[in-house]
Image (cartoon, rainbow, N blue to C red):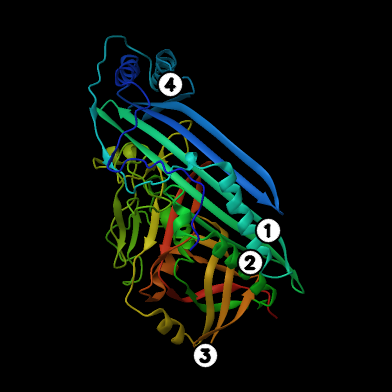
Amino acid sequence: MQRHAGTISSPLPPGPVEAHVLDEAVIQRTLGAALRTGGEWAEIFVEDKRSSSAVLDDGKVEELTSGRDRGAGIRVVVGETTGFAHTADLSEDGLRTAAEAAAAAARGGSGGTEVVDLTRHTAPRPNDVSVAPEDVAKATKVELLTRADQVARSQGSAITQVMARYGDSRRKILIANSDGLLTGDDQVKTLFSVSCVAFGDTGMQTGRESIGHTIGFELFDQYDVEDLARRAAERALTKLNAKPAPSGTLPVVIGKGGGGVLFHEACGHGLEADLVGKSASAFKGKVGEQVASPLITLVDDGTIAGEWGCFAVDDEGRPAQRNTLIEDGVLTDYMWDFLRARKEGRLSSGNGRRQSYQHLPMVRMTNTVITNGDTEPDDIIAGTDKGVYVAQLGGGQVNTATGDFVFGMTEAYLIEDGKVTDPIREGNLIGNGPEVLTRIDALGNDFAMGSPGMCGKDGQGVPVGDGVPTLRVTALTVGGTAA
């Protein structure tokens, strides 16, 4: 594995995380202003985020950007009503104005003095950062892109287009509320991806690979961008010789790490308490019921060190949790944010997340995974007479209320006589998430996380991860173009 060069090591300290974004006395007075003018409960969320990115498209550096975004969002609750205001003005006057606006939105003020006692809470950093990306020269980041571009093109003349992307961010947050909570987090993420286009008799075919973790620039000590580029190119080239996908109802084997997005989209969203509360979930009212194959245990885990969806505390200050949602096929719980949990008289599950200080938090997933089974993956393939093997799923569409989905197969093969044979192209998987959970009859022992992703919900995007072992669905509709 090739190591990066030319970096200056600037490790972030391990251990408890504290974010000193605002003076504690200012926070107290801001919360006091929110309560004094009518709030029953108030929260201030402060964010200071720096990010940089670079894109190499067709051998040319098309983007090389960096930026900083900082501000505060203030939430005030009165009864069932929430008032929210955000500001980029972090002066005490600016914060007080925002607090009063949020309180006014929730209820008119009644005067008087309100004092908020704050107790600082710290949460252990889920992983150490040994090389802060902001300390790495832009030239070093561009060199990674150039190397990936060259290796991808060297895989064959059929590779006609290559795009490589690099991105990093450091997000310091502080959360305080009128219950006395004062905590924070310091989240560092680094991302790299390569997309290739191959041209041949079957037209244009694409291949993509990406890596992303909640760590610093040491990501490139753990992953080789040349290997990443090679695999992206090979994926595109393989599809040039692929057969049209079959159509019909077939057994489908999903490879390790390759199908987590299906369970995130078609099942995970249905386990978010806000959608359950709106009766927009197929899992509403089914806690304690068998909703999946007894083989299936589905977990949402924000504590997996280094993974794309991990953090020390969520955007409401609750420490990250490992939440078992389905255990041995039985629905055990939903995911919760602060307000929904408070209404039910329970603790949040650490799933309150927001895109930025300009947004209200809502229930969001972190790293959503199906845990390991005990079957050898080769035995799952050997036990499938005829079907489809999906190495990687692509994008799709999901009705979260019903779980109905359509996903494209980015990399897939036929299974014939218990063996993986020809690659196939232009195929979709069509089905229903809750039904898929009941139709899993084999679960491998080779769990792997999939690619990093951004989950969109109500216009907000947050980083999430997913993972699965090899598994087999007894029957799924494959939408192909084969005659």
Amino acid type, callout 2: Ala
Residue with the most extreme top position = 112
Q: Which residue is mark 3?
A: 417
Q: Are marks 2 and 3 in contact (CB under 8 Å)?
A: no
From the top left corner, tell me how far across and down residue 75 is, in percent. Answer: 39, 27
Give me the disc on residue 162: 1
User: Which tag is nearer the camera, tag 3 or tag 1?
Assistant: 1
User: Which tag is nearer the camera, tag 2 or tag 4?
Assistant: 2
- The residues tagged by marks 2 and 4 sit, at their Cα atoms, a distance apart of 54 Å
Q: Secondary structure at mark 1?
A: strand
Q: Secondary structure at mark 2?
A: helix
- Residue depicted at x 36% and y 67%: 292
- The residues tagged by marks 3 and 1 sit, at their Cα atoms, a distance apart of 37 Å
Mark 1: give few (<14), some (14-19) or many (20+) Cα within 10 Å: many
Give me the disc on residue 233: 2
Give me the disc on residue 105: 4
Identify the mark nearer the N-term, 2 or 1.
1
